[in-house]
Amino acid sequence: MCQIRAFETGQICYLYPVQSFVVSARKYRPSSWHDVIGQDQVVVTLKNAIKNNHLAQSFLFCGPRGVGKTTCARILAKTINCENIQENGEACNTCESCSSFNENASFNIHEIDAASNNSVEDIRSLVDQVRYAPASGKFKIYIIDEVHMLSASAFNAFLKTLEEPPLYVKFILATTEKHKIIPTILSRCQIFDFNRIRIKDMTQQLEIICKNEGIDCTDEAMHLIAQKADGAMRDALSIFDRITSFSGKSITAKDVIENLNILDYEYFFKITDAFVVEDVAAALVLFDEVVNKGFDGDIFINGLAEHFRNILVCKDESTLKLLDTSETVIERYKSQSNLISASFLLSGLNILNSTDVNYRASKNKRLHVELALMKLCYVHSAVSTLSAGGMEKKTPDLNEKRPIANIKPISTAVKPTETNNISDIPTVSEEPVKKVRVENSTIITPQLESVETVVIPKKTDIRQAIKKEEDEKSAALLTKTVEEPLKVISPEMFFIVWKQYADFIRKDQNRVAIIMDAAAVSINETNNIVVRLESNLEANIMKEMQNDLREFIKDGLENNQFDISFIVESVKSDKIKRPYTTQEKYKKMEEINPLIKELKETLGFELDY
């Protein structure tokens, strides 16, 4: 800022420097249909409508932020008011209407922000302006941005004008929240849904901008900016300006990662290599570096899961198009995918998914993630073991040195011997070579020094041996049961277990518990339990619970030598007790304490049984 003194008046005038910098989002804002990126379906439809003169009375542009809704609304307004529309549907940019629009001086195109003009009075003022025809040009066009911010009363006041506007009026509404607009407004508009801009389209646009600005930006850096923008071109350009201020005329992926605080994908490549060689220490050290940089464990887990997904995608050439990253990174994914099996990746994704789901509920979140990393280190061995034949294998020790057996040359062969019983399998002698026939194919196995060779029996022989062993165990158990003397059950212990079972099921099976309390139960010296019931219904209910009751008695008495039978007979013995009803309980209380009856009559209570 500088100051000068006027000669005539002696006043001091201040001159302020004019700011020459314009943000990229405004500087490279599209001014024609050709410049719009990522919205081909919208552009083609509108251009054809302009060519064929099939323009609707009102349009609704809806979609995420920063994808070009308001920009397309301005281009549409400029084009339909152009006096010399070209054959490709573009405005001429030379006529009076186009020139005034480019200079923000058009009297026929009005842009209204509904976020600050959302009352009924604002809409009524708009309706009054609609009545007057344009002084020059074809149409009066009203662009209402963020239209979902209008109040319910403002929407209702706008309905009639929106449904039957004058022929010279066009409405273009734009919103990021389509679900907040009332259905009566939606039914009166031609709706266009804008998509999120693809990473490929954004990187191409950033490449053009870098070329115009003379900035050297790597492909990886542009892909990271596009990924961080989340489908919004305006956000991508804002991030680009921020990175440019940080790095100057040369932008690398490292600059973008440091400035935007992105978790570097290099960590995921290194930790995956640690999984391949089962290096737990390296994996834990890398995770410690990630935590020290300020990243939470859930961000790391989600990033690692995304890394596994990208490696899995690289397993097939037809799915490479699903990767939205630079060619350099894709090549690294390809090279790492050759070292890892698909089964390991699927098992790892399952572990990471479980870790992510349970992360919030975990008390020690760091230990929760570290346990997942330890599991991932040994998934490869577990998968290899299962694929080799399902044999159990202990956790490998990387420092263990395994001896290498010496192989003798093949000299002779022994004829295969068919065996029908596992006990008939001949023992293996110390011969230089053994030859075994398995399912009509001959396999010659060399004799190893200090290694015992075992002939693998057929599956049928194994099944027969297992069946024979089970029969012998059953016969031995039966003989033992027959020879074992009867263990008499004490009646006192039995009634204790009977009462325990009734109390155990009382909460869920109250009816069965009541039947057990009222039943007459007896047990004799031969462990025969007789349960006398009053009706067939009670007997059927108890028979349904018989198996569960038997198991409970067996576990409680540690005795399986008893029988249970249910007999239906009318039993009216004083020894048999049944639960009182509500009315009987009250009568019993009156007998014990007569004052209860007097209290009831004095206060005038009525009992509902």
Image (cartoon, rainbow, N blue to C red):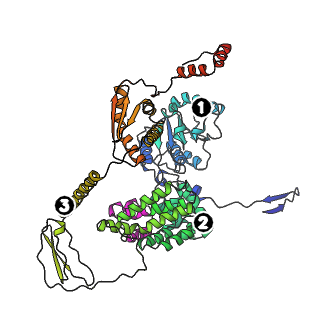
Identify the residue position indicated by label 1 in the image: 152
Residue farthest to the left? 415
Give how far across and how far down residue 533 sits, in percent. 37, 28
Q: Is residue 324 magenta?
A: yes
Name the residue: 40% across, 49% down: 558
Identify the residue position indicated by label 3 in the image: 464
In primary-sequence order, the first of circles 1 and 2 is 1
Residue range (magenta): 308-336
Numbered-mark total: 3
Comparing labels 1 and 3, the label whose residue is closer to the camera: 3
Mark 1 touches mark 3? (CB < 8 Å): no
SS assignment at label 3: helix
Whole-angstrom CA distance, mark 1 to mark 3, is 81 Å
In primary-sequence order, the first of circles 3 and 2 is 2
Mark 1 touches mark 2? (CB < 8 Å): no
Nearest the viewer among 480 and 111 is 480
Residue farthest to the right? 10
Asked if residue 357 lies left or right of residue 311, the reply is right
Give how far across and how far down residue 132 sits, in percent. 59, 31
Nearest the viewer among 69 and 420 is 420
Local crowd size for mark 2, using a 10 Å CA cut-off: few (<14), some (14–19), many (≥20)? few
Q: Could you tell me the amino acid type at mark 1?
A: Ala
Whole-angstrom CA distance, mark 1 to mark 2, is 43 Å
Identify the residue position indicated by label 2 in the image: 259
Nearest the viewer among 607 and 80 is 607
Whole-angstrom CA distance, mark 3 to mark 2, is 71 Å
Comparing labels 3 and 2, the label whose residue is closer to the camera: 3
Q: Could you tell me the amino acid type at mark 3?
A: Gln
The quadrant holding residue 408 is bottom left
Give how far across and how far down residue 479 sits, in percent. 25, 54
